[in-house]
Amino acid sequence: MAVRAETLKELEEKQEWWWAAEKKRSSRLDYLRKAMWKKGAIGGLYPAGLYIDLERPVLQTEKARELEFSPDPYVIKFAKILAHVLDNKTIFITDHSQLVGYLGSQPHTITWDPTLAALLNHEVVNDPTSIPEPMDESLKTITDVANYWAGKSDLDKILPHMDLDDAMKVLSGAIGWGVPLSRGGYSGKDYEYIMSGVRAFEDVIAELDRKIEEADAKAHEPGASKEISDLYDKMNMWEAMKITLEAGIRHGKRYARLARIIAENFETDPDRKEELLQISEVCERIPAKPPRTLQESLQYDLFIQLFSRNEAIEGAWPSRPDYYHGPYYEKDVTIDKALTEEEALDLVGEFLIRAAEVSQYKVRWAREGLQGIEGTWVWTLGGVKKDGSDACNAMTIALLKAARLVRVANPTFAFRWHPKVSDEVMRECFECIRQGLGYPSMRNDPILIANAMNWHGHPIEEARTWVHQACMSPSPCTKHGFQPMRMANATANCAKIMEYVFTRGYDNVVNMQIGAETPPAETLTTYEQVFDAWVTQMKTIFSILVRPVNRARILAPKMTPRPYLSAVSERSVDSGLDVCDPSISRGNAWITAFTWVENADSLAAIKKLVFDEKKYTMAQLKEALANNWEGREEMRLDFVKNAPKWGNDDDYIDSIMLDCLREAAKFSRELKCPSGNNWPILPENVSGNIHYANIVGALPNGRRLGDALYDGGISPGPGLDKKGPTAVLKSCSKIDHISDGRAFLLNTRLSPTQLAGEKGYQLWKTYMKTWADLGIDHVQFNCVSDETLRSAQRDPEKYQEVIVRVAGYSAHFVDISRKTQDNIIQRTVQGLG
Amino acid sequence: MPTCKECKRFFPLEEDPGKGDCVQRVIDPRQAYYQAKPVSADKDAVKCPSFEKK
């Protein structure tokens, strides 16, 4: 990428923020940012130049073969396989870097975990775009690995223990998204245990040794009981945890050694030599001992995350980096002055880059649903401390500044707003939004703390530690509060609820009876009967999705254990039970509700045009939908234009939205997770609105099969919010954001011209005050003009760095599909003031 | 027959000289880096294109 000739001021005036960032960042950050291989799939395919890393699956398979007939319990075998990978994988240190660690053996590789699911392995075998050369040799290796794990992978093992009817409906891809696995989804972390600065891996190992010693003594005392019998399983679990932590320490020391070898044998620049010796010192200590400096703290966090991704495919990155790294930033920059602000920004910016590079091969539906990114790395900033005081610190500001310098699309930030947030921090948030990053999304902290207490009974001190477990859902970082795995298949394609009312639960796209056999639509004679059928379909779909997750959570401790994640979790270190064991978790489950608003818009159209005005019959509507509105364009436009639409402060439809949410909320309290807690819904979409375009049939809101669905959450349909931003907020505020669901995504587009200068900030601040006063839990902004986006469509090479907010995540505009690009452009630009 | 331990790029482990790392400089289209791959000292290096005698 050539450096632009314009001055920084000229670029900022033209709002070409991506070029301005290039001029503003240090030469180190510039090198590292340009050195980064973007890993997000484009149109479901990985970008050219990226290859599946075969080293790791070969290491896993060779160790598994070696251990096949060993007497070790499965959890110990699994830990040894993980250790074998960490001990033997190729590692590397990039020029100019100060932080180290990557999942793959080379920077341009995507790691593949063959132990997870045969269906994933089949995709690898059949993905010619990512198989490394020489192709024949690679295919031979891939086939050997895939054949070995067929029948042995987690999903293969777990499926026979599930209700196969439910499993087939989930795997049909019509109503859900993901699989019920403890090693594939969104892993929360017990940061209060492992990131608080008081302990690191050696301390945990010492604790595990104590536990094993005590248990061993107890197991050999005279007597016999179930408790004693259980101790043998616990000792195995503790031993497995220890194996993973020891491997983690050795892995750190491998980097220390490599840095030292480079410094002593290859590097000629004395400054870089010093940096390499510094890396060596850091990695000799980390992750064995607690960090002392910002560099050590960031390196520690990075190792914790990478080890976890060596154990599982993690589609999210729950994190609170300002809260946990803030004390080290303050010490190094403000107190000791060991680092200048610029030096600290280099470290913070590199931390974002290191995270942005992480990649794990995923099935195609996941790649399509997360266009342009590798997963939803939504890092949580701001918020309050456990005592309710403001948690923002200098690291909060550093992260927001660094984000504008490196402009990665993933990780993104979500900011926990509360009334005590300073104007300085709000300005930093605004600056990121104004400069078109699409983040931070803004979260209403007091509302969401109350929500966490309401839905899952988290005590207030624990609720206040919350982070985004994926795009949107809060989860505490505490011993019993954090959720070790949110299994992604509890993601409901909710537009199917409406569709099934007209098909009696039969899915015409996948040719399968999935929903309930409610009465034929043409026999429904009142709106109330239609709504009853809707409720039945909603309950049926939610139940099908939740049952496999509940089952997988119960099976996980024995069949798909997580010894490493357990080792960094206080509840498992204490109990000797796997981290997914429901008995040691309070529960923090939720159903992600994709394509939700279509239901309210459709029901309102039926109520008005069929039952109030009697312009059409249910039989006519059923026939029109069955034929995808073909030959009924006039009727379709009636349903589009002359029916009330959500987001216009219209009580007619807004009350229908509330009826839907409250029925779902009521049912959420009947659905229970294995810990006995509730399953609230959370409307949001990622890019599921495009993924599902060809899976959801015609709907009564006028949508045809193949049309993009709405962009999700409680965002109005694109272009259907005609009455301005306050009307959108007013509609949204009719929802009780504490008790009607777990969280509600709201997309908003603002004009970059309007946000320019101090006036722009004041306008935004006023908007945010209205948002906060109305008790809405979420809002996120796109602030890139139509003109820029259309130019990027015409000339993508020139606009490689333009970022947009897709849904609960951001992506580079050129990395998302044309359909998603168009969908973003169609969203209404709201004028403020 | 050349073995890894005779190569310039082989760095033995202090605690176990029978094992070590093959350390190489790599330049890809985006970045330059040093990589280390664990190898045994006595590994046959006949077919290794990077072998360079100490």
Image (tube, rainbow, N blue to C red):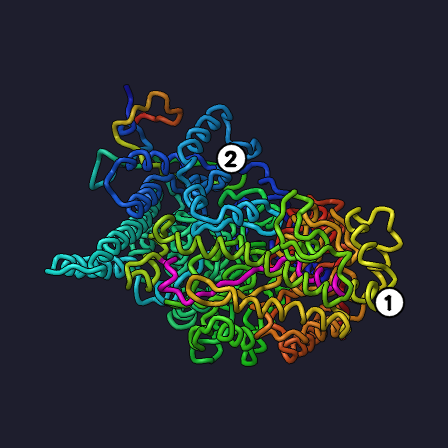
Percent across and percent down for residue A672 are 48, 64
- Residue A426 seen: no
- Foreground of the two, A400 or A229: A229
| Residue extending furthest toward the top | B1
Q: Give the range drawn in magenta.
A: A579-604
Give the mark, 1 or 2, whose residue is nearer the N terminus.
2
Any magenta on residue A751? no
User: Which numbered dot is residue A553?
Assistant: none
Query: Dot 1 lies on which element?
Result: loop
| Quadrant housing residue A478 | bottom left
Is the Cβ of the residue at disc 1 closer than 8 Å to that at disc 2?
Answer: no
For the N terminus of chain A, the image quarter is top right
Q: Dot 1 surroundings within 10 Å: few (below 14), some, or many (20 or more)?
A: few
Image coords of residue A275 (percent x, y): 38, 52
Taking the magenta stretch, the answer to whether it contains residue A580 is yes
Using residue A464 as the reference point, say whether residue A689 is left or right of it.
Answer: right
Q: In the picture shown, does residue A593 fall above or below A134?
A: below
- The secondary element bearing badge 2 is classed as helix
Q: Which of A151 and A96 is in front in this view?
A: A151
Spot occupied by residue A481 in the image (x, y as percentages of width and height)? 42, 68
Tell me which amino acid carries mark 1. Answer: Glu
Q: Mark 2 points at which residue?
A: A122
**Which residue is tagged 1?**
A613
Q: Residue at x 65, y 48 (%)?
A: A691
Identified at 50% across, 61% down, the residue is A469
Say whether residue A581 is visible.
yes
The answer to whether marks 1 and 2 sit on the same chain is yes
Which quadrant of the figure has residue A763? bottom right
Looking at the picture, which amino acid does disc 2 mark? His
Which residue is painted at 32% across and 34% down in the image? A65
